[in-house]
Amino acid sequence: MSEPTTPLVFASAVTAVPSPDIGDAALVLSDRSAVAKWVVRAGAETNAARTLPRFGTSERAGDVLVAGSRPGEWLMLGAPEPVADRVAAVDTAGHVSLVDLTHSRAMFRLAGAQAPHLLEKVCSLDWTDAMMPDGAVVSAFVAKVTCDIVRRDDAGTRGYLLLSDRSSAQYLFDALVDAGSEFAVAVGPPKVGV
């Protein structure tokens, strides 16, 4: 008889004290690392590749955000159960792999009208709507950390999801808080959601 296993409990790599009053904050940075994060890799000839969003774009599939992060590679982000259901629905015929990166990647959400101006200080991309519209997906160095970035506006508020390796999470979070000091960036509470 085998002993029951205990499910993994997510622990963020970031230690951050939420700002006391974020209700009036025009710019908010929050740790979303507890979001389920799966990567799908699929050859161009597969049904999986044909049904997922094209490279550089993202789309909602129910409660899951699916982002074409690289040619032949997609990120599936969201609460654990909906992501697990979406991953289970991927056609795995052909050259397709599915890997759970939840515990190896950090994710932050930067939201507010000043978000592009903060990001301009730590990343050389063009953050204008023409170059980075809602739903766009890019990879770039942010404060010298390799990140996948998804523009994801919510209820009219401009926002970006930034994903990095867990080992760089605290440094990246602190660099974003420092870069946002002139914009009075507030630190939001950790949250599971995209």
Image (cartoon, rainbow, N blue to C red):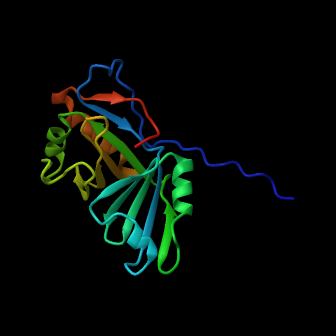
Would you place residue 13 above or below residue 72 in this image?
above
Q: Position of residue 154 (x, y in %)?
A: 31, 38
Q: Position of residue 171 (x, y in %)?
A: 32, 44
Would you place residue 93 above or below residue 190 in this image?
below
> Image point 14% across, 43% down: which residue?
121
38 and 141: which is toward the camera:
38
Q: Position of residue 39 (x, y in %)?
A: 44, 62
> Image point 30% across, 35% down: which residue?
155
Q: Position of residue 88 (x, y in %)?
A: 56, 62
Quadrant including the C terminus: top left
Residue farthest right in this picture: 1
98 and 60: which is toward the camera:
60
Q: Is residue 100 left or right of residue 179?
A: right
Q: Is residue 53 left or right of residue 114?
A: right
- Asked where in the image residue 21 lies, by quadrant, the reply is top left
Quadrant including the N terminus: bottom right
